[in-house]
Image: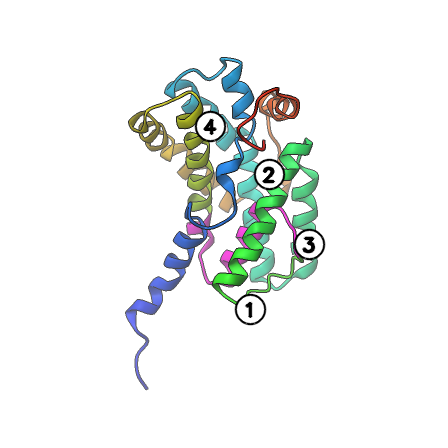
Amino acid sequence: MLAPSPAAGRLPLLKLLTMLSPAFPVGSFSYSHGLEWLIDQGRLPDGAAIEAWIADLLTLGSGWNDAILLAEAWRAADAGDAARLAAAAELGEALAGSKERRLETMAQGAAFLAAIETAWPGSDLGLGGEAPYPVVVGAAASQHGIALADALPAYLNAFAANLVSVAVRLVPLGQNAGLAALAALHPAIAATAARAETSSVADLGSATLVSEIAAMRHETQYSRVFRT
């Protein structure tokens, strides 16, 4: 019997890179996560402020909750537990504290489900046509043999990179300043991913109330570039 090709072991990594690439059509570029309103109000005027804001989201806010939901979905899919996966999806939707936060997570989740079926036909995740984005990513990672330890930091890095991209366009920040901000966030990304890997839904919770208020205020902002 022929030994497995060493290249086959790289396929999960390649799938992960593809799923969380800016080229994967989930429309993440059109969501600012409330940053558009904050920047308009002068609350985030430079790279240091952007970096600190995103670090709080990663460690204390929506990024942290997303990581826990992703991990819960990964474990549910890995165990073949459809009820647990459905509960994670329901919980993720319930945690969206405003109309725009719900739009952001559910629309990206639906787009991810459609895209993954196009890329890998037969990838039925058992989530219907719509589910929160981190839940869909976690279930897909499990189904495609991607380790949770890899999926978590990759997802959080993509989360942070998208918000930095918003700041590059709106503050505006130069590309180099944006890159420096993202690089500076790597320790927070790695630490949050490690915490989430050993956490459960009992550890859900956030302390970034102004971020939630910003998402609500954005709904009625006079001039908008982003959907949220």
Per the image, the residue denoted by label 1 is 122
For badge 2, the amino acid type reads: Glu
- Element marked by disc 4: helix
Q: Tell me where the magenta segment starts and ends, as one range.
A: 129-151
Q: Cα distance, mark 2 to mark 4?
A: 17 Å
- Element marked by disc 2: helix
Q: Main secondary structure of the magenta part?
A: helix
Per the image, the residue denoted by label 2 is 104
Q: Cα distance, mark 2 to mark 3?
A: 19 Å
Which residue is rendered at x = 57% and y = 55% of the image? 113
Q: Nearer the viewer, residue 207 or 140?
A: 140
Q: Cα distance, mark 4 to mark 1?
A: 36 Å
Per the image, the residue denoted by label 3 is 86
- Element marked by disc 3: helix
Residue 26: x and y in percent read 52, 47
Sequence-earlier tag: 1 or 2: 2
Q: Are marks 4 and 3 in contact (CB under 8 Å)?
A: no
Which residue is rendered at x = 46% and y = 44% of the image? 155
Marks 4 and 1: which is nearer the front? Answer: 1
